[in-house]
Image (cartoon, coloured by chain):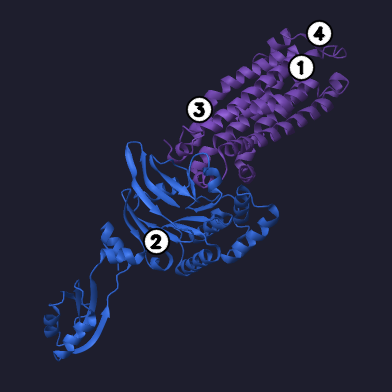
Chain colours: A purple, B blue
């Protein structure tokens, strides 16, 4: 894992591309919404946002969020959550796609397989190597996002609104679990592809519908409440454990070496 | 290490065919063969990366299986070309390897210094591997393979890219390593020059078949059962006529000499006595020694570049 992290730090191009998406989601978009409000051309241009504002149930909102600030509150505290689920998944997908396949492309995989690491250790190491930078980037993004809402948003809401319990659970529990599942899926397909580009393409095809489904469920669950999010998290935890054990058991060194 | 009737098929192709040999503790075994002969596949089988289609491999008195291969690999060090992380420094590469083999962080730093001192790389600790010459990279990959003090060291073309001085130093180091630690070494190599000095046993593999196995002397004696002498005697014509009774005559290395190949059980002193008694002036007699290089080319065919 340490090797992969050092590799990312040393590669300025990867570092830069990993920072772009979080910067847009955590700073540029929320700043525009806070400055321009909810009834403007920008909000209208974001697909589904107007419908979301119209249909959102504000009865669960804190009692002091009133006087027309409800739509902005709904956008920042609910609509944005799936975007922050996407950040780590996208980053982890990029890193994980080149983990085992990248090692094979650089001809370093065989050296790694000669070590006494067990299949479980190898798979877990590679999952963490992709998950840790993805989670760090997400946490930094959330902190920037929260700081922005609580400072620039102070004039809109009259008080500090971030974070609430839902955000804490999503960031600290749901996010890592979704990321773990995404990376596990990528690693499982990477045995069957030859280059990191193909791994990335296959990963996108496989991961996005699954993650999209999970994210849309999560958005619904967020409006339903904390209990629903915890339930989804528990379900994901079980899926993650089963996926990890399955992938470790099926990890085939011969396939990686011979690329057959 | 014991390889017993091991075969390996990859797809429909048989890469290794019924291969058996044994390597005792503390011995050095050189595996020779042309490119594509099956040497790398053999290394992968020994390290448990590939599973034999037939036969079994025993390592450290245990049968190598999928279940225990991780534990057994702890005792093996493998050097092969280009498996270093090029974007990391030499120090980071070695440190990483130390961690993977469970070496305590407190002793890793000292060990890195010790090994870099030996390979004369102590001033390159913070150099990225990608910036090193091929020879230096080769040294780092060998340093990495021996870093955790394995019981079995597998070297794939260890002298490739090394200058003659570094090659000599490496051979001295490997001999010392075997002497001091009792380590066993398997070396896949094309370096035939001076191989007898380092390898206790030699195996020649061709198209997955082990076509020769034994000490250098055993292989040479088997391939060249006759003894060849270079003889310089005056007059040359009469001397060759006398010597024809004892064996085959060939051209000598110089025009005033000839070569005699003896397969009969006769000592050279008797032939010299014969020449002297026939009033020959015998100036030179020496045995033309065959090397493992000669034997190798005789076994695998091809042209020897002397």
Q: Nearer the viewer, mark 4 or mark 1?
A: 1
Task: State the CA–CA distance, disc 3 to disc 2.
Answer: 49 Å
Marks 3 and 2 close (CB-CB < 8 Å): no
| Separation (CA) of disc 2 from disc 4 | 84 Å
Chain containing mark 4? A
Q: Position of residue B136 (x, y in %)?
A: 52, 61
Count residues near mark 2 (Cα–Cα under 10 Å), then give few for <14, some for 14-19, many for 20+: many
Query: Image check: B14 left or right of A249?
Result: left
Point out residue B178 in the picture as x, y percentages from the top left corner.
51, 64
* Disc 4: which residue: A59
Which corner quadrant of the image does residue A150 belong to? Answer: top right
- Percent position (x, y) of residue B90? 59, 56
Q: Are the residues tagged 1 and 3 within 8 Å (C-beta)?
A: no
Residue A152 against residue B55 in the figure, above or below: above
Q: Dot 1: what SS?
A: helix
Whole-Å distance between the Cαs marked 3 and 4? 42 Å
Residue B201 has which mark? 2
Tell me, yes or no, whether dots 4 and 1 are on the same chain.
Answer: yes
Do marks 1 and 3 share a subunit? yes
Tell if the residue under mark 3 belongs to the same chain as the one under mark 2.
no
Q: Nearer the viewer, mark 2 or mark 4?
A: 2
2 and 4 marks in contact (CB < 8 Å): no
Circle 3 Cα neighbour tier, 10 Å, few/some/many (<14 / 14–19 / ≥20): some
**Among numbered discs 4 and 1, the one appearing first in the sequence:** 4
Element at label 2: strand
Which percent across, then down, holds residue A30?
Answer: 74, 24
Q: How would you rate the neighbour count of disc 4 (Cα within 10 Å): few for under 14, some for 14-19, many for 20 or more? A: few
Q: Could you tell me which residue is drawn at 54 percent across and 45 percent down?
A: A112
Counting residues from the start of the chain, the first of labels 1 and 3 encountered is: 3
């Amino acid at each position: 894992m340490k090797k992969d992290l050092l590799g990312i730090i040393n590669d300025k191009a990867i570092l830069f591309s990993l920072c772009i998406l979080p910067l847009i989601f955590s700073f540029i978009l929320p700043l525009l919404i806070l400055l321009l409000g909810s009834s403007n051309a920008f909000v209208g241009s974001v697909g589904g946002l107007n419908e979301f504002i119209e249909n959102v149930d504000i009865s669960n909102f804190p009692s002091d969020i009133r006087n027309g600030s409800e739509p902005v509150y709904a956008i920042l505290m609910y609509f944005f959550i799936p975007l922050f689920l996407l950040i780590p998944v996208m980053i982890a997908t990029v890193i994980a796609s080149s983990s085992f396949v990248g090692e094979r492309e650089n001809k370093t995989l065989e050296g790694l397989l000669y070590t006494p690491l067990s299949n479980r250790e190898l798979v877990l190491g590679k999952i963490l190597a992709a998950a840790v930078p993805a989670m760090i980037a997400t946490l930094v993004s959330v902190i920037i996002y929260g700081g922005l809402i609580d400072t620039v948003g102070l004039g809109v809401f009259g008080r500090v609104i971030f974070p609430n319990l839902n955000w804490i659970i999503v960031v600290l529990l749901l996010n890592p679990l979704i990321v773990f599942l995404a990376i596990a899926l990528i690693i499982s397909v990477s045995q069957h592809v030859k280059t990191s580009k193909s791994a990335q393409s296959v990963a996108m095809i496989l991961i996005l519908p699954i993650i999209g489904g999970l994210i849309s469920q999560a958005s619904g669950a967020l409006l339903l409440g904390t209990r629903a999010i915890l339930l989804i998290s528990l379900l994901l935890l079980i899926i993650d454990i089963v996926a990890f054990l399955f992938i470790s058991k099926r990890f085939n060194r011969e396939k990686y070496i011979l690329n057959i | 290490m014991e390889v017993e009737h091991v075969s390996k098929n990859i797809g429909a192709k048989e890469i290794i065919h019924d291969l058996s040999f044994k390597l005792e503790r503390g011995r050095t075994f050189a595996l020779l063969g042309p490119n594509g002969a099956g040497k790398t596949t053999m290394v992968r089988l020994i390290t448990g990366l590939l599973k034999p289609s037939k036969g079994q491999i025993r390592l450290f008195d245990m049968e190598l299986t999928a279940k225990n291969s991780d534990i057994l690999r702890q005792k093996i060090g493998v050097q092969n070309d280009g498996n270093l992380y090029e974007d990391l420094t030499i120090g980071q590469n070695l440190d990483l390897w130390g961690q993977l083999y469970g070496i305590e962080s407190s002793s890793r730093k000292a060990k890195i210094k010790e090994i870099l001192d030996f390979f004369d790389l102590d001033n390159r600790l913070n150099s990225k591997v990608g910036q090193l010459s091929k020879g230096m990279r080769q040294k780092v990959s060998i340093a990495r393979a021996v870093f955790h003090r394995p019981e079995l060291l597998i070297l794939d073309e260890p002298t490739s890219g090394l200058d003659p001085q570094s090659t000599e130093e490496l051979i001295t180091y490997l001999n010392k390593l075997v002497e001091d630690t009792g380590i066993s070494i398997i070396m896949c190599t094309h370096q035939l020059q001076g191989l007898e000095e380092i390898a206790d046993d030699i195996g020649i593999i061709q198209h997955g078949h082990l076509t020769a196995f034994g000490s250098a002397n055993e292989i040479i004696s088997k391939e060249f059962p006759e003894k060849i002498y270079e003889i310089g005697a005056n007059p040359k014509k009469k001397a060759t006529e006398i010597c024809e009774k004892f064996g085959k005559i060939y051209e000598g290395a110089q025009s005033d000499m000839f070569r005699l190949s003896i397969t009969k059980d006769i000592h050279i002193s008797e032939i010299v006595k014969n020449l002297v008694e026939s009033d020959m002036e015998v100036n030179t007699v020496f045995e033309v020694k065959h090397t493992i290089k000669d034997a190798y080319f005789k076994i695998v065919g091809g042209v020897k570049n002397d």
